[in-house]
């Protein structure tokens, strides 16, 4: 894997910019602008949206636990085929920033997403570590959520509110995979690479990645923010150890699949699972 701290050509040095016909990385100013654009088109915008949503929740009469945050809801109630079209459209368009990141990494001759460890070279490694990580993170995450909600620091999270149609479970699985790919490729692999190229220290890059992850979960409440920050810090450390986002994508996808599908199967049937 290429180092996150590889040297970057200075924007003021003639003959080293991306427009000078030489093979190499873009200038620092280009990388900085590019990073802001990628975040503005993806999870940075989600973080701002989540902050606005959180402000609305805390200023609304009543406690947070009496309010609900729905993750996968119907886009066209009563019209299942149109609903399916909107669901698939949303999943596909959410992955466009990942395609953009792959293009940008190819531009700098980095090998696309392969340099981040998102490829098919080590499927057994990625899946085995992803399963273990999902078991650890998933179990502790449920406990944190239940505790935060009980103490009034979290909204009631509704992982799915889709109609009972044949495509419900496949769409929930596809949504979980989309979340995993988008978040781990951009918030861990891409962001750490760019911040390293821009001269950020390892600790500062870890803090930025984990705070960003927490920010776009703030719509769930303080518990969602803190829990995802901790998860983000752990994922950064494991990415640096393994050199691959593949295990993180696998773990994240498994966690969300269990949450989405599990809620669909258990909501209203077990007493410990909060519902609106």
Image: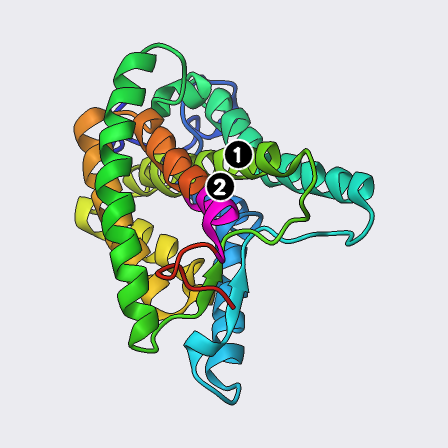
Disc 2 element: helix
| Residue hosting label 2 | 261
Disc 1 element: helix
> Along the horizontal axis of the image, is 241 left or right of 87?
left
* Majority secondary structure in the magenta region: helix
Question: For mark 1, does the 10 Å Cα neighbourhood hold few (<14), some (14 to 19), or many (20 or more) residues?
Answer: some
| Residue hosting label 1 | 173
Q: Is residue 207 visible?
A: no
> Along the horizontal axis of the image, is 198 left or right of 42?
left
Q: Is residue 129 visible?
A: yes
Closer-to-camera residue (191/56): 56
Q: Quadrant of residue 170?
A: top right
The answer to whether 26 is drawn above or below residue 122 in the figure is below
Closer-to-camera residue (206/3): 206
Residue 135 x, y percent position in the rendering: 25, 37
What mark, if any, has residue 235 been given in the picture? none
Q: Which residues are magenta?
A: 259-268
């Amino acid at each position: 894997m290429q180092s996150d701290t590889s040297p970057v050509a200075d924007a003021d040095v003639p003959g080293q910019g991306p427009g000078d016909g030489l093979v190499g990385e873009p200038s620092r100013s280009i990388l900085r602008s590019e990073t802001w654009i990628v975040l503005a088109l993806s999870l940075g915008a989600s973080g701002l949206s989540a902050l606005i949503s959180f402000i609305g929740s805390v200023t609304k009469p009543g406690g947070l636990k009496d309010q609900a945050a729905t993750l996968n809801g119907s886009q066209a109630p009563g019209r299942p085929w149109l609903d399916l079209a909107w669901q698939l459209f949303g999943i596909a368009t959410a992955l466009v920033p990942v395609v953009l990141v792959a293009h940008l990494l190819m531009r700098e001759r980095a090998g696309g997403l392969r340099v981040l460890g998102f490829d098919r070279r080590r499927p057994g490694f990625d899946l085995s570590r992803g399963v273990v990580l999902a078991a650890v993170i998933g179990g502790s995450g449920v406990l944190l959520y239940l505790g935060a909600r009980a103490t009034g620091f979290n909204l009631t999270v509704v992982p799915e509110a889709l109609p009972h149609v044949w495509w419900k479970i496949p769409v929930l699985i596809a949504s979980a995979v989309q979340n995993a790919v988008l978040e781990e490729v951009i918030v861990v692999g891409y962001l750490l690479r760019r911040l390293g190229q821009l001269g950020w220290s390892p600790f500062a890059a870890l803090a930025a990645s984990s705070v960003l992850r927490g920010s776009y979960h703030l719509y769930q409440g303080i518990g969602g923010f803190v829990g995802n920050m901790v998860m983000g810090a752990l994922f950064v450390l494991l990415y640096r150890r393994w050199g691959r986002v593949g295990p993180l994508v696998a773990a994240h996808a498994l966690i969300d699949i269990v949450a989405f599908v599990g809620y669909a199967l258990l909501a209203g049937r077990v007493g410990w699972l909060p519902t609106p």
